[in-house]
Amino acid sequence: GIKQWVRATVAEQLAPWNRTGITTAMLRGASNYEPRIGGSEHIEVKNGKVRGSCDWAKYMRRAAKAWPFKTEELRDFIVVSENADWPFMMKGDPKADPSRAGPALTNANNGNFWNILMPVQSRPQFGDHFVANRERALALSRKMAWKERKDLAVWRGNFGCTIGCGPRGAAYFPENHLEACRDDSPHWDINQVGIPYGCGDHKYEQVGAWLKHWRVALVRYSAACGEGCGIDAKFPAIGTEHRPFVVNYTGKDYSAWTGGYMDDAKSAQHRYIFHVGNNGYADRSWRMFALGSVVLLVDSGWQEWFWSYLKPWVHYIPIRSDLADACDKMRWARANQGAAEAIANRGRNYIEQC
């Protein structure tokens, strides 16, 4: 059940500190860790009260009020939270090792960082508004019977074009990293941090590494193959910040990449919805399950906090990160409507019950 999964997940994530415990010096090591962008702060739980101002603290206050375990299990603790999309406590860096640094909360992890997963706080989804938002999404699901939905797979989302850069780049993008990068929107030393703020490519050559980003890859795949296998994946727009960079590769006509905005109500009119992360995750991922469509989950290697509970072909249909199997999976789903609808129902039921 859910409680058993919660206990196992927490135990697994905190296992690196089982032998030593977590000391004040370790928390200081996590708080002062570099390189990092966005800074960090502490969240403290004392006598069942949560102290902190970030969105994780707000979520934790809601969780403490609905605490499902024994009261004595809500023990006092302090934890570091990183205030950025990405994690930074990289495995292999002695400064981040659990012997020197305590855990730090993050939105997503691909196994290459010591950070521990929490419900996302960037563009937060799990604060006091979560219950009402979940009911709205589930209500949209109930309005659209499976047989009334369009037999198409859709996606709309923000533009993403990040790659891995420098010595830390492989930790973020094991399959798409360069020794030295340039950034179309410089905010920090990308070859030191490991990731750019905006679109990245080779520092001295135009190799198009950003075109392999999962979101760009999905949109390009849709433009090339979507009509034949029922895939409609587009960016609502490519913002002015990144447009000059993109046009330098595509030319001025990138209309095949863009399409109208699609809110939850429009998304729920389709039988299939892609989930594809941007900076390691997609903040509205849970809502895609709640809408009652089959979630086609692009496996980038990054996981959110509830991913370990979900099972492929039970709650979602897995899609390779390079999209090579997307059309084949769509053909299977279209030819096996009963099985596809059952996957959609199990995904929705998980969100409804949890």
Image (tube, rainbow, N blue to C red):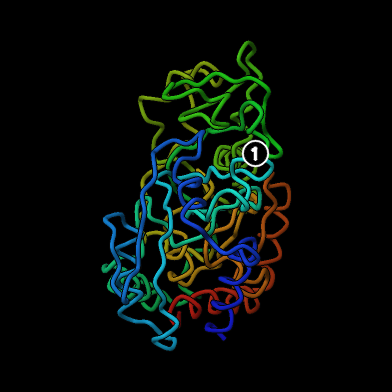
What residue do we see at 39% from left, 40% from top?
Answer: 39
What residue do we see at 36% from left, 47% from top?
Answer: 261
Residue extending farthest to the top is: 204
The percent position of residue 256, horizontal first and vertical second, equals 51, 34
Q: Going by the image, does 134 lie left or right of 336?
A: left
Quarter the C terminus occupies: bottom left
Front residue of 102/321: it is 102
The residue wearing badge 1 is 173
The kind of secondary structure element at disc 1 is loop
Residue extending farthest to the bottom is: 70
The percent position of residue 273, horizontal first and vertical second, equals 52, 59
Residues packed near mark 1 inside 10 Å, few (<14), some (14 to 19) or many (20 plus): many
The percent position of residue 164, horizontal first and vertical second, equals 61, 32
Residue 91, placed above or below residue 296: above
Front residue of 95/254: it is 95
Tell me if I can see residue 106 in this picture.
Answer: no
